[in-house]
Image (cartoon, rainbow, N blue to C red):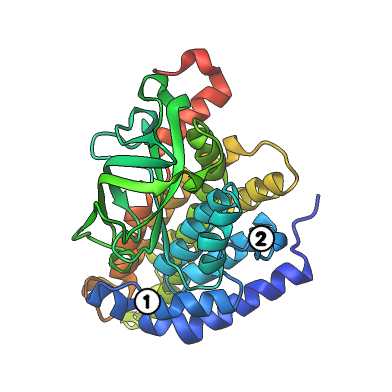
Amino acid sequence: MDFDFTEEQLAVARMVRDFARKEVLPGYARWDRERVFPRNLWKRFAELGLIGMRVAPENGGQGADCVTQGLAAEEMAKADPNVSVAAFVVGELCGYMLEQGCQRVKDEFLKPMLAGEMVPAIAVTEPHCGTDAAAMRATAFKKGGRYVLNGEKSGVTMAMAADAVVVFAKTDPGAGARGVSAFVVPTGLPGITRQYYEDMGSKSLVRGSIFMDDVEIPEDYLLGEEGQGFRMVMRAFDVSRVYLALICIGTAQACLEQTVEYTKQRYAFNQPLARFEGVSFSIVEHISLLEAVRLLCYKALWLRDRGLPNTREAAMVKWMGPAFAVRAIHRCLLLHGHYGYTQEFTVEQRLRDVIGLETADGTAEACKIVLTREVFGREYLPY
């Protein structure tokens, strides 16, 4: 058993850490207040090879392993969890899905995404269904050599910034999950409209709804085969859920480090707050819990890199990582006193941003259903 990272993996982590501190952290609060996605940063990510890191080299990617991308996601989140989600969750999911397309898809969408010239999004959820994604109502019907898409996709991360969206829709409405197919859809096509959400946090991810009214796309824009969309995205979630957990952990780590320094300098009753066990014990408890989940995250990625099942571990960290991170950041906010509630410190923004990740790519309840299947067997599922 080896708990060490390779020198190559550590080099990537150092590179991302330096880049994030110099070029990402200074804009973190500003992008939140301006409610904008930093498109110029997307190009910089591409220059550093941080978009679609796991895409195969023959398709223009780095061919990185999961553990390496996990380290990059964690380090980036210490500066800005939102851009980390964009690069290492949306970029991962869209990169994987676009690789399932034909050469035309790779030329028109995958290569521009990897070059930072195209901002992607992925649309699974609908207003009436999220966890039960197989119940989606968006449809895609064949019409000659084209598909016609109709429906609404909600809660789409980067909906307002995206140049193209990976859309999941029913090609066989009566087949349940086996009737779901995946497509890449340019957002500038006739029949596409978008609506921005006024979210509590993660404002630079400009989430929103995407409406499709008789949107026509070439049949070549189908990703994989008809009826395989749900299966493909569920497999992809076993990786993206781990990255989301690491992003939450990295964000909480940054808050805890900041709070350790603050409590050393803030005095009460003629001594630093850090000397009070009510302060120091709570901080080290959160550090301990987050480190435990962090190790399980890297085990989940290690398993995936070796082609071994990691669904169980991915579900575990997806409910624990965000939940424990929210608790840790909330404690940090309280330990900052009334300053923690102001925008003078980033802790309040980090709390808002991480709360949103508790529902991304599967709520805690959805992940526990997955674990129930893994532990008890499919016959004990509630559906």
- Residue type at mark 2? Asn
Residue occupying the point 36% across, 58% down = 354
Question: Mark 2 or mark 1: which is in front?
Answer: 2
Between 187 and 379, the residue placed more toward the observer is 187
- 144 is higher (above) or lower (below) than 111: above
Residue 144: x %, y % from top left: 41, 37
Residue 380: x %, y % from top left: 47, 15
Between 366 and 280, the residue placed more toward the observer is 366
Q: Which mark is residue 38?
A: 1
Between 78 and 137, the residue placed more toward the observer is 137
Quadrant of res 347: bottom left
- Residue type at mark 1? Pro
Residue 108: x %, y % from top left: 51, 62
**Going by the image, does 65 lie left or right of 349?**
right
**Going by the image, does 56 lie left or right of 287?**
right
Which tag, 2 or 1, sits closer to the chain's start?
Answer: 1
Say which residue label 2 marks.
Answer: 59
Residue occupying the point 60% across, 77% down = 48
